[in-house]
Image (cartoon, helix red, strand yellow):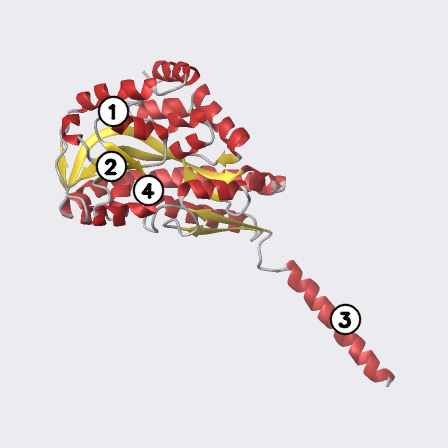
Amino acid sequence: MWSKIKYLFRGLLLILLLSACDSTTDKNPQYLFKASLLVKENHTWYKAFVYFGSLIEERSGGRMKLEVYPSEQLAKELEAIRLIRSGVVDMTISAGSLTNFAEILTFSDMPFLLKDTIAMHKLINSPIGKLIEREMIEKIGVRPMGYFQRGERHLTSNRPIKHPDDLQELIIRVPNAPSYVVAWKALGAKPTPMAFSEVFSSLQQGTIEAQENPFAMIKNAGFSEVQKYLNLTGHLITWGYPLVGEKQFQSLPEDLKTIFLQAAREMQAYEHRLFLSNESKVQKQLQDQGMIFVEVDKIAFMENGEKAVYESLSSEMQEVYKSIKKITQ
């Protein structure tokens, strides 16, 4: 009887020891992040987030892990921000849509504000750019992990658009950001805010007639299948902020914060290399797919749209606008 008890005791002890060993080599991460993206898997943003995930997992010894969900599988852009704030989702990419939570974010995605990418970099790295980042953290509860250049936004349609006069009553999908609605309405179109994941089917069904995005996004979404003309309006030079919830970031111990931030810097550099390589190819790919590129009267677009956007701002934001113009000249 005693021997049976002794063997039973040894067996239990062995199980406890094995359990202890398993807990030290447990593959389940201490910190599991979920990223909700609007782009498909072949976009540079998705590839950059996957790269970031590999860095934090490797350098943390598996304590951190990232799952990346493309094509708005988890949530549409605005809903993703709300879910980050409530702790359900952890990361996404956004910019102008954040205006719905903090007014100053309108300058991260404003038509006719910046003349080129040099001006964009000046704004991002200026005191106003740093104020935008602080407000994201303090007012919205999301922390920018860097920024991804998006290139100029252009208008696609099924009729050529060379001048604002050609826009009359054209139903254009725009992001859910006030400055887009104001600008396109001033130009004579009928802007319709809509989630990105709904745009292709809406163009296909004729619910909307046009949309505007950078070259890479037009290619990534397959808009060449439902739009014939790519009108080179270049009405907006923009970027996107890869974001993490501030609560989620602050929950990390200091050693993992260091790993996280360093990996984020490397992700930004990695995405930029992908962006530059992709930008040189994607225009030809769109033309090869049958899209016709149309030169437009950019001065007419600027004259009709810039004033309306400025006048739509609060008096406080108008002063910020003037400062940005000085900074980016």
Specify the amino acid type for callout 2.
Ile
Q: Is residue 203 above or below residue 117?
A: below
Residue in front for this viewpoint, 319 or 183: 183
Q: CA distance from mark 3 to mark 1?
A: 77 Å
Q: How dense is the environment of label 1, judged by Cα within 10 Å: few (below 14), some, or many (20 and up)?
A: some
Specify the amino acid type for callout 4.
Leu
Q: CA distance from mark 3 to mark 4?
A: 54 Å
Residue matched to label 2: 172
Which residue is located at x 31 percent, y 30 percent?
Answer: 180
Q: Quadrant of residue 272?
A: top left
| SS at badge 2 | strand
Residue matched to label 3: 13
Q: Quadrant of residue 219?
A: top left
Q: Is residue 67 above or below residue 93?
A: below
Specify the amino acid type for callout 3.
Leu
Question: How far from the left and from the top, in percent, is residue 127?
Answer: 46, 19
Specify the amino acid type for callout 1.
Ala
Q: CA distance from mark 2 to mark 1?
A: 13 Å
Which residue is located at x 38 percent, y 20 percent?
Answer: 313
Residue matched to label 1: 186
Question: How far from the left and from the top, in percent, is residue 159?
Answer: 13, 38
| SS at badge 4 | helix
Residue in front for this viewpoint, 287 or 85: 85
Q: Quadrant of residue 307?
A: top left
Residue matched to label 4: 274
> Is label 3 or label 2 in front?
2
